[in-house]
Image: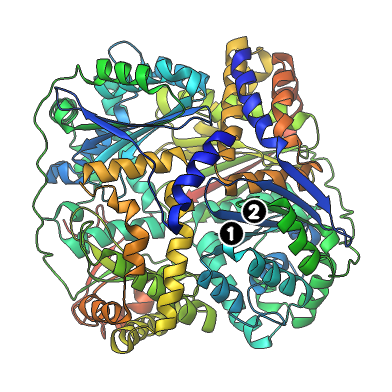
Amino acid sequence: MKILFAILAAASLQFGQAKLPQYTKETRSNGAAIAMMPRSGVPLVHFRVLIKGGVESDPPEKAGLANVVVSLLRRGTTKRSAEQFAEELDFLGGSFNAAFDGQLGSATAISSEFLSKDFDKGLDLLADAVLHPAFTESEVRKEVARDVDGLKSVKDNAQASIGMYFRSTFYGRAHPYGNPPDEKTVSSIERKDIIDYHAKFYCGKNMLIVVTGDFDPVSAKAKLATVFGATPAGTAYAWRTAQALSRKGQMLLIDKPDATQTYFQIAQPGIDKKNPDRATLEIINTLFGGRFTSMLNDELRVNSGLTYGANSQVGQNRLPGAIAISTYTKNDTTTQAMDMALDVLRRLNEKGITAEQLVSAKAYVKGLYPTQRLETMDQLASLIGEIELYGLGRDEVDGYFARIDGITLEHANATIKKYYKTGDLTFVVLGAADKIREQMKKYDPHATEVSIKTVGWGDR
Amino acid sequence: MRCFTALLFISVLANSQNVQTATLANGMKVIIQEDHNIPNVAMYFFYKIGSRNERPGITGISHFFEHMMFNGAKKYGPKQFDREMEKAGGNNNASTGEDLTTYTDWFPSSALELMFDMEGDRIRDLSFDPKMVQSERGVVYSERRTSVDNSNFGILYEQMHAAAFIAHPYHWPVIGWPSDIEAWTQEDLKDYFAIGYAPNNCTMVVVGDVTVARVMELAKKYIEPIPRHDPPPPVRTKEPEQLGERRLVVKKAAQLPIQMIAYHVPEAKNPDAVVLDLAAMILSTGQSSRLYKRMVDEEPLALSVNGRAGDALDPTLMIFTIQPRNGVDPARTEKVLYEELERLQSTEISARELQKAKNQLLTQHYRQLKTIAGRAQLLGHYDVIFGDYTKAFTIDKDFEAVTAADIQRVAKKYFTEKNRTVATLIPEGK
């Protein structure tokens, strides 16, 4: 491991700046892009295949399709049964994870890791799954039925289910982020939908392959080109255009009669991945609700003991997302906690932050960055994927500390006024409605109420 | 597959070569690994105290204490630990279990001295502000509501443990019974600090962008002067042998049932523990595992199934957690589990299946070494649970030595009707 440490240390410490190690990227004649970052040392190789589309590519009435497709990749190919695939993968001690690239990701990510000596076997397994899945009728039926039951089990987890309700409420069903899969949409998925989706999206022009870790770049390049360069070129997926958020300033109340605490989110419009205010918002949100001593956690947890945790998140997806406060508290302190969260928001909006807070947040964000983004081969692969897929450029990493350092107090406080507003907020509340319904009227006299037992996520 | 193991072993050994250890005059053990990959440090403190050191009336106090460690000491008052740490670019967490309380600090190497100063301050001079105690009680109750009362898995796990252990302290939940959370006093906390937070009852692990010399210099300055005192008294109570199957039901609003079937198994140091780890791999790790194939894939019986026993200081449980599919009677998943356990008892597994489990266990172990945080965790864990951190680098020899006959033997020994507790959550009011 010594060699690896030496190289990375030189790269990441230079001038006190974060720096992305060099990588190569080449596009094959069929449009497939292959990026490689060889790093000798740890005897592991990490593959990450990205397929453009993700949550944006789900047909509205068949939400969940892209996810069903990726789950089925390993469930049998033209040359292996699902069982053979599992047996070979497990025997190598390899990993194979397939999911959206982030919850609201605009791509599907397939990540697979093997010992370096198993490069060929690993690549064969991965490519077989990605390029030649069989999608047999029996596997399709099993997967769809499992997914439907999986969605039922989400309802047994308050924190997971409030996230689904949040999507349909905040974005609205017409928005690609506002259409989470439910039992109905998933049940309607058929084998033909899956085969068509795979043929359309899993093609050269729509595919990025990232390889990081300990491997020989010369032979790897040839092997990757042979495997992924031979797949049909197809058509590149065109991102959907951003839609204005359809609704704001309303509440959805989800009734879970047995809940002994209320979970809630309070949200307003935020930014997309390329917004120039991104670094500034990361700093502001760190102070508002992004770390333990943040204003929200300090008030709701440390000072008052109302909750185990209160936070705020700024979505950074391809399309503009939300700035959302999340927390929970016992039934009879619901309004106390909500009022307190709103009060903290008002204080931020009116008073802004201080020079001392700004210094602290900058140090915090920069201090944690290396362990969060630059430490492991899978983190580096994920970073390269994002840079290439969304056209962020190397500056995403190399210019990051400079962008943080360049934020002035004036700019930070002006940015607060621009984004952290106190009106037109969306509330999503999950709890025992009988105990909190009346009190919720002061936030929205026309709140919509839905039972958690009703199939779906509140709007269809 | 020998070369597979050999290859891993070489790189793992490369890691063990730059691990240094020392024991301070007050008895605290220090384990250091220099790693200059990124300019960051993981500094972990493992206190050998947890819910097994509690008694009825103060259940959950180890965990509550962990919270109080962030609420002010002599030099750094309330909120200061987190504020100073975050301002220096660091972050922290802590966790409490049955056996251990672990404090985990991650920070840029420039904050090393500050962290020693603050850790020394709170170990030596923790204050117990009554106002902070009261407010923190609310926080902990909220944590309980989230992880137990409003979590179907959490509540079943708690009830199952309480039934499987009738005498040993693993009987009560780490977070504590609600009435104890509401009732513990200032005095309880002070008494507890006096027994648990002895420097001689702790192992410190520092991994990352540091030098051994600098860490030792700071440890001598900030930690060594803290006086040693008596560690917690030994846990006397041993769980008596179970004399017959125990069954319990939890009725709760839910979409799907949950089943937990637990068998008493030995502590981590017992040679059977590693055999059971491999048995767990064979049964439920990966889509090629026996239970996954049978229950999730071939028959639509369960959404998920997994079996595991954690490394524990005292005899513990191997728990099979099953989420039956919608409409499936939990009696069926239970029956299928027993059939698979019986198969493990009656027929010796093939050489390939055993090797697959070994490969899986080894790569899983190995992946933990990728980050400074993962290595700090692993080194400390092996030091306090096994009494020797180098075990982290030789555990593969133990895996390799396990035979198919060993798997069959432990399956017969532990997976018996008399030794099991069956807990089922049944949805009500659907």
Name which residue lies at 60% across and 28% down: B361
Q: Quadrant of residue B182?
A: bottom right
Query: Of residues B49 and A47, which is closer to you in this image?
Result: A47
- Residue receiving disc 1: B109
Q: Is residue B277 above or below residue B91?
A: above
Q: Is residue B37 visible?
A: yes
- Which quadrant: the C terminus of chain A? bottom left
Q: Amino acid at mark 1?
A: Ser
CA gap, disc 1 and disc 2: 7 Å
Q: Is residue B123 left or right of residue A206?
A: right
Label 1 marks a residue whose chain is B
Q: Amino acid at mark 2?
A: Val
The residue carrying pointer 2 sits among few (fewer than 14), some (14 to 19) or many (20 or more) residues within 10 Å by Cα, namely many
Query: Mark number for residue A128?
Result: none
Q: Are marks 1 and 2 in contact (CB under 8 Å)?
A: yes
Query: Of residues B171 and A373, which is closer to you in this image?
Result: A373
- Which quadrant: the N terminus of chain A? top right
Query: Of residues A189 and B32, which is closer to you in this image?
Result: B32
Label 2 marks a residue whose chain is B
Give x and y (percent) for residue B246.
Answer: 69, 43
Give x and y (percent) for residue B21.
Answer: 79, 47
The numbered mark, 1 or 2, whose residue comes first in the sequence reads 1
Q: For mark 2, give the secondary structure.
A: loop
Query: Mark number for residue B210?
Result: 2
Name which residue lies at 51% across and 77% down: A301
